[in-house]
Amino acid sequence: MAEPLKRPVLVTRVGHVGPDHHRFRGFDVGAELVGHESYWSLISLAIGGPRIDSELSRLLDDLATSLVGPDPRIWPWKLGRLMSAYGRFSVGMAGPLIMMSSGRVGPAALASVARFFDELARELGAELADEGALTRAVERKLEQVPRPPGFGTPFRNQDERNAPIIALVRAHGRENGPHFSLVQRAAPIVFQKTRLPVNAASLVSGLCLDLGFSPEQIDVFGILLLVSNLVANSFEGSREAPAVLKRLPAEFVRYVGHAARKSPRAESGTAP
């Protein structure tokens, strides 16, 4: 007689909805979280991170504000504007989120940058504060990755977001965190070797590493720190729904291929 099939079981640590209370990451939502947790603390708990106090929540609020730049000429905000032109805000949100799942633009870049500096810090170990050791370690990393993530500012000489981010981190007393300071110490070495200036992704990743988040968690945080830019474009795009984003006017299209011609079959008169 065949053995009975063993039904697969999926285990979740996210939460449970019960008849008289809801639980989230082990906490009773009504009794322990409502009135006590900020939005950022809920997000941290959602991805397996720690509860975040009010001071740190204000820092993350300031950080998210410093990253506001919803110019629709910039990818992936441009994609959100294009897709929402068909009248749906949610579609405008969904497309760029898929686009941002990989590549050098967006939150995926933050995860790559975080890995780069996390590996650099681990390699230095007890020599983290040694400038000579740092220079040698950066040089070794550049041999492996000639164009490291978190460096380079297309179409401009420097990232205009850097100064506000450094200022707000200093204002919140977090400028001496090991990873955040490592980013600033490594930046001139990388620039000397590659002529690539540090960008905001490095500073954000360094800060998030100091707050105790892993590169995979920083990937999620990156989306939420930037989401206001996507919301702005998806909402305005869905409201305006401009026809020009659905079909280019014919008078602005110029064909530069081969001249119109008949196929050999059409020339022979045998085409149906």
Image (tube, rainbow, N blue to C red):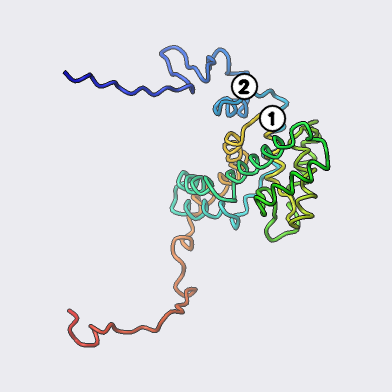
- Mark 2–mark 1 Cα distance, whole angstroms, equals 17 Å
Check disc 1: other Cα within 10 Å, few if <14, some if 14-19, many if 20+: some
- Give percent across and percent down for residue 193: 76, 55
Q: Residue at x 83, y 43 (%)?
A: 132
Front-most of 10 and 58?
10
> Considering only vertical position in the picture, is 160 above or below 130?
below
> Considering only vertical position in the picture, is 49 above or below 205?
above
Front-most of 140 and 113?
140
Residue named by callout 1: 211
**Quadrant location of the C terminus in the rendered image:** bottom left
Q: Earlier in the sequence, mark 2 or mark 1?
A: 2
Q: Which tag is nearer the camera, tag 2 or tag 1?
A: 1
Residue named by callout 2: 37
- Give percent across and percent down for residue 60: 68, 33
**Quadrant location of the N terminus in the rendered image:** top left
Q: Amino acid at mark 2?
A: Glu
Tag 2 and tag 1, C-beta contact below 8 Å? no
Q: Amino acid at mark 1?
A: Leu
Q: Residue at x 61, y 36 (%)?
A: 215
